[in-house]
Amino acid sequence: MQLSDYFDQEIMLAIPVLGGDVPQRVKLVGVEPGGIWVQSQSLTTSLLESVGASSAPVTPTLFFPYGQVIFVSVAVEGSALNEKAFGV
């Protein structure tokens, strides 16, 4: 499994700049040796609010070095179970 396998898909990641260790849903739009490029509606909204705009002619895409990423989560095929719900 490689992060580049999830190009152009939604992933979950945690980056301190985006809210600490709280996962954020983003679209992975680029993978480089030094980091990743992502798009996110929440990021877009924050950026537009910071400049007092309601829209932009382009979609913001942000680069984050791997050193800033706490974790990345992707979905894979197969059932996910809550063991506590089954008494395990």
Image (cartoon, rainbow, N blue to C red):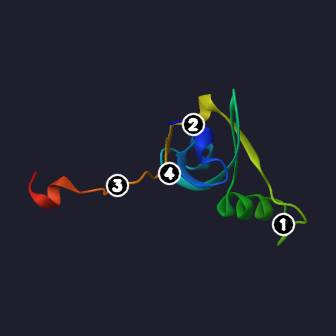
Q: Residue at x 57, y 41 (%)?
A: 16
Furthest toward the left, the residue is 87
**Separation (CA) of disc 2 from disc 4:** 10 Å
- SS of the residue at dot 1? loop
Q: In this rendering, is residue 32 above or below 10?
A: above
- Please, is residue 81 above or below residue 34 in the view? below
Q: Position of residue 4 (x, y in %)?
A: 63, 39
The label number, if any, that marks residue 78 in the structure image: 3
Please tell me whether mark 1 or mark 2 is closer to you in this view.
2
The CA span between labels 3 and 1 is 44 Å
**Of marks 1 and 2, which one's residue comes earlier in the chain?**
1
Tell whether label 1 touches label 4 (CB within 8 Å). Answer: no
Q: Which one is in front, 62 or 30? A: 30
Task: Name the element at disc 4.
Answer: loop
Count of labels shown? 4
In the rendered image, which residue does mark 2 sit on? 69
Going from N to C along the chain, the mark reached first, 4 or 1, is 4
Real-space Cα separation, disc 4 to disc 1, in angstroms: 26 Å
Q: Work out which residue is located at the far bottom of the displayed protein and give it.
A: 54
- Which corner quadrant of the image does residue 80 belong to? bottom left
Task: Give the mark toward the camera: 3 or 4.
Answer: 3
The residue tagged 4 is 23
Query: Which callout, 3 or 1, points at the residue further toward the start of the chain?
Result: 1
Amino acid of disc 4: Pro
Q: CA distance from mark 3 to mark 4?
A: 21 Å
Of 42 and 82, nearer the camera is 82
- On the image, numbered disc 1 is attached to which residue? 52
Q: Amino acid at mark 2?
A: Val
Q: Is residue 27 left or right of residue 87?
A: right
The amino acid type, in three-letter code, at marker 3 is Gly
Mark 3: few/some/many CA within 10 Å (<14, 14-19, 20+): few
The tag earlier along the polypeptide, 3 or 4, is: 4
